[in-house]
Image (cartoon, rainbow, N blue to C red):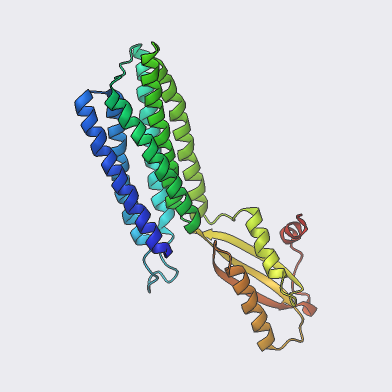
Amino acid sequence: MSRRGTLRRVGLLVLGVNLALAALKGVVWFTTGSLAVQGEAVNSAADTAYSLVIVAGLYLTTRPPDFEHPHGHERIEPFVSLFVAAGIFLAGGVVLWQAIGALAAGTVAVTQGPYAVGVLLLSAVAKYGLYRYCLAAGTETNSPALVATAKDNRNDILTAGAALVGVAGATAGYPLADPLAAIVVAVGILYTGYEVVRDNVAYLVGAAPPEDLRREILERALAHDQVRGAHDVIAHYVGPEIDVSLHIEVEGELTLYEAHNIETEVIKSVQALPEVDDVFVHVDPKELGEWKDDDEVERLADLE
C-alpha cells in the first residue's frame, strides 16, 4: 500500500479505537462510579478529539503536490505532531495535579469493581496494540505524526497501568499506591511530550539528520568510480524528509555529457535512501582547485 493509504488507514483506525474506548469507559464509569475509570474516560475522549485532528492532518499531508506546493504537503506533519505533544502535556499535567491533590487530601477512593478492572485491562491491551502498530507504520513511512501518536498510546498504557496499581493497592490495604504510581506515570508522560517536541522542532527548523545517515550520503556520493572528492555536503530536514546538496569533484577533461551522467548517477544513488527527498549536485573540475577542505566531510569519511 502507498504511503498515503497507510497513513490514512492508520489515522482512521486510531480514531475508531479511541472512540470505542471512550464510549466503553463512559458506560463503566456511569455504572460503577469509579474515579479511576472516570479519568480514563476523559483521557479517551481527549484522545478521540486529537485523533480527529490527526486524521485531518494526515489527509492534508498526503495530498499530492500542486502548483502552490510543488514538493507536496509533508511539512504539515510536524505541526500535527506538536498538537499531539500538547495533548500529551495536558494529560501529564492533569494526572500529576490529581495525584498531588489526592496525596494532599490524604484520602483516596479507589473502586475495586470487576468491571473497572476489566475495562482498564482492555484499554491497556488495546493501547499496546495501537502503540506497536503505529510505531511500525510510522517508522516504515517515516511519519513523525504516527510516531508521536505511538508514543501517546504508550502513555495511555501507563495511565491504565497506574489505575490498576491503585486498585491493587487499595485491595491490599494501601490506597495511596494509586496517587504515588500516578506521579511516576505523569513524569514519564511529560518526558514523552518533551521527546515529541524535540524531534519535531528539529524537523521544523531544518536540523541535520543523524550522523550515520550523513555518512551514508557521503559514502554514496564517493562510491562512484569517477568522483574524486566531495565538499560542501549539506543535509537537512524539510519537514520529515531530507534535502541534500553537495559538490563533487571529477576529472576536468570529461565532456559535459559525461559529467552530466555522473551527476545523475550520484543523485539517484543518494535519492535511493528512503529518508531523502531532493538531491542537488554541483560538479567541479578537480584540476581548477575550486573545492575547499571540508573538515566535516573528512571526519565522516574517516569514521569506522
Using the image as rendered, state which of residue 43 and residue 13 is in the foreground: 13
In this rendering, position of residue 188 left or right of residue 18: right
Q: Quadrant of residue 231?
A: bottom right
Residue drawn at point x = 20 percent, y = 26 percent: 31
Q: Quadrant of residue 226?
A: bottom right
Q: What is the quadrant of the N terminus in the image?
A: bottom left
- The x, y position of residue 2, in whole percent, is 42, 65
- The x, y position of residue 197, in whole percent, is 47, 44
State whether residue 244 appears in this view. yes
- The x, y position of residue 254, in whole percent, is 74, 86
Q: Is residue 64 above or below residue 208?
A: below
- The x, y position of residue 216, in whole percent, is 66, 61
In this rendering, position of residue 227 left or right of residue 123: right
Using the image as rendered, state which of residue 34 and residue 258 is in the foreground: 34
Using the image as rendered, state which of residue 107 and residue 194 is in the foreground: 107
Q: Is residue 160 above or below residue 74?
A: above
Residue drawn at point x = 34 percent, y = 48 percent: 14
The number of numbered discs placed on residues in the rendered structure image is: 0
